[in-house]
Amino acid sequence: MRIQRVLLSILIFCAMAGCGSIPPTEGPVPLHSQIPPSEASSVNTPENPVKLSDTPEITEMPILPTDPVAQNPVDQAKKDLAQKLNIEETQINLVEATPVVWPDSSLGCPQKGMAYAEVLTPGYLILLEYGGTTYEYHASQGGTVVTCKNPSPPVLATPGNT
């Protein structure tokens, strides 16, 4: 899903970049005059083909909370995990806090015997790490933070992030 967002962003950027005006030139400009000699070895030519291993890989970056709405659930999850593991909150690393939509008000953690409102619930999928182990927390935008043994996945990313 994140790869699709990255590709869509690149596509939109390219489309927008194509809307600008390019000043006309007086005939073709030779390729060698555009590239400094120090960089000429990285040009893809028949004499010097670029290998796939020479191209940078696209790596996914974790989505970290940048707004106060996301920071509160992350802080609550860290506090809960620190209490459970009997460690300091500062020892816990935030891996990811992704805006998502949960399928109902259980936030993907339904418990037997409980009834939940069947409404799409915006929130966050929070991944924390300590000692090489990743811990999953689910949160609502309203501040409820839960963790469960058999979590259900979210239904989709929030409308602002798709």
Image: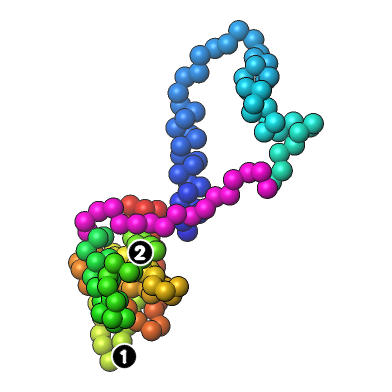
Left or right of residue 92: residue 17: right
How dense is the environment of label 1, judged by Cα within 10 Å: few (below 14), some, or many (20 and up)? few
**Which portion, as a residue range, is magenta?**
53-69
| Label 2 vs 1, first from the N-terminus | 2
Q: Position of residue 71 (x, y in %)?
A: 25, 60
Please tell me whether mark 2 or mark 1 is closer to you in this view. Answer: 2
> Residue 74's mark?
none
User: Which residue does the image show at 54% across and 12% down from the upper left?
Assistant: 24
The residue at the far right in this view is: 47
The residue tagged 2 is 94
Nearest the camera: 102 or 124?
124
What's the amino acid at mark 1? Lys
Q: Secondary structure at mark 1?
A: loop
Q: Position of residue 157 (x, y in %)?
A: 38, 60
Nearest the camera: 37 or 141?
37
Left or right of residue 24: residue 42: right
The residue at the far top in this view is: 26
**Membership of 55 in magenta stretch:** yes
**How many callouts does the rendering have?**
2
> Residue 112's mark?
1
In which quadrant of the rendered view does residue 100 lie?
Answer: bottom left
Q: Secondary structure at mark 2?
A: strand
User: Which residue does the image show at 64% across and 26% down from the upper left?
Assistant: 38
* Mark 2 touches mark 1? (CB < 8 Å): no
Task: Judge whether 9 appears above or below 30 on screen.
Answer: below
Q: Is any atom of residue 137 visible in this view?
A: yes
What's the amino acid at mark 2? Leu
Q: Position of residue 114 (x, y in %)?
A: 26, 88
